[in-house]
Amino acid sequence: MCIPMWHAGERLGFLALDTVTHEKHWADDDIALLRTAAEIFANAIVREHNEREREALQARLNQSQRLEAIGTLAGGIAHEFNNILGAVLGYSEMALAVLLKESRARRYVQQIMQAGRRAQDVTEQILAFGRRHERQHHALRAEAVVAEAVDLLRASFPATLSVQTHLAAADAAMTGDPTELQQVVMNLGTNAAQAMNNRGALEIGLDTTEFVEARMLSHGNLPAGCYLRLAVRDTGSGMDQATLERIFEPFFTTKPAGQGTGLGLSTVHGIVIAHRGAVDVNSKPGEGTTFEIYFPQIEAAEATQNEDESDAAEVPIKHGNGETILVVDDDTPLMQLAEEMLAALGYEPVGFDRSPAALSAFRTDPERFDLVLTDEVMPDLTGIEFSGRLHKIRPDLPVVLMTGYGRQLRSRQLTAAGISEVIKKPLLSAAVAQCLARHLHSG
């Protein structure tokens, strides 16, 4: 009979045992056969491993494509919602300016403004997920930004929940938007608090780490290099694998109806990707959850220089002196709102809801207008196309582009079209006044 055994030199063979003489010898045919079987088995293991890796990579690709498609849809929704929100906030702001301070009507309108601003926050989250809003990335020291966000979290949490911090990043810096970095901390912290039913201890840490080789994380891959690591740990109910695979999808939530928008974590994911970072999530049911966010680290000297440059004085708000402003927006109510807003600021507005009609009026008397305020997304001519045609007629004319969505705008494209500045919808009087003052009252 043949007994399988490990032979010296790590060879796997068969030992033949003569049951009569009890002499032991190797059966060469059996050894050859076993070696072939071992090779087949080893190859099968490799194939299975490769197949699992391929399936994992395909699943990540599918998730990325699904998130991208939803992001495009979300951006379109945000555009339409911004138009509606613009009218709500704009007319509410104008109503507050004429209502008596102690009147009941003023209190009602103030509530409308507050609700509108909350809706604006939701829109910003959608835009952040869809990566369609303009970010202000510059060098910054992460620890100070995170510490400020933690203070805001502490102030919003009940006494039953404590926040323990381990901030050890010192002067470590990154390139990013400080508001968005704080939003990451706030969203992760709020999500963790809800997972713990606002009881217990929430841990937030910030430190630096270095990868000597590329690293594959649960939600993204990182090349070798130095990183800032933001960690948020809770002792909540944890998540199973099926939930982990969907946590960054927009509108996906495990909370009861009315207790969450499902946008918090998808917003985090969008911000991290925009900052060239990645996310690693570890969680098991009943064992809590840890989110680790990695951001590429830069030299601290860059952040110091940027902080020195940020001390410039703000431009004071000024009213107009009857300057004529050409206003173009294909949404008629918003065009009319802009006209009323500009008139209240002391300007002479001339509004059009079709860009061809506005272009015709401009060609008739190019010197009539002191500045142009135009929407970007319009059916006949986009704002950039419209501005480019104006620029050929009057290269010195200031043009301000309004956008609440639209395709990615490139500085070279804006410069070629003669656009002086881009402002974000929905418009509010203070922002419009500051913008116009920069281009009309700079002297």
Image (cartoon, grey):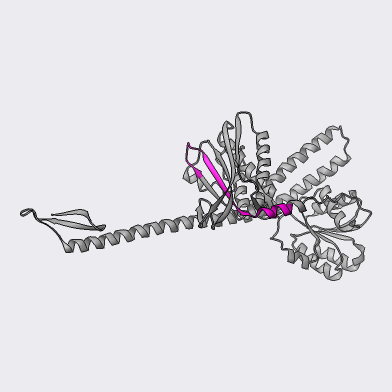
**Residue 305 counted in the magenta span:** yes
Left or right: where 355 falls relative to 143: right
In the displayed structure image, the side of residue 54 where residue 416 appears, left or right? right
Q: Please name whichever residue, 305 or 127, is drawn nearer the observer in this view of the structure.
A: 305
* Vertical side of 309 occupied by 379: above or below: below
| The C terminus lies in quadrant | bottom right
Task: Return the residue found at the far top.
Answer: 159
Number of on-image labels? 0
Is residue 18 rendered magenta in the image?
no
Residue 96, image x, y percentages: 85, 40
Q: How far across and how far down the image is residue 135, in percent?
A: 70, 54
The residue at the far right in this view is 321
Q: Is residue 399 visible?
A: yes
- In percent of width and height, residue 183 lies at 66, 45
Q: Nearer the viewer, residue 338 or 440?
A: 440
Q: Which residues are magenta?
A: 282-306
Residue pictured at 73% horizontal, 54% vertical: 305
At 51% across and 50% down in the image, what residue appears? 218
Which residue is rendered at x = 59% and y = 42% of the image?
Answer: 205
The reply to whether residue 380 is visible in this rendering is no
In this view, which residue lies farthest toward the bottom?
392
Q: Specify the quadrant that holds the N terminus.
A: bottom left
Where is residue 160 drawn, in percent x and y? 60, 28
Locate residue 133: give its quadrant: bottom right
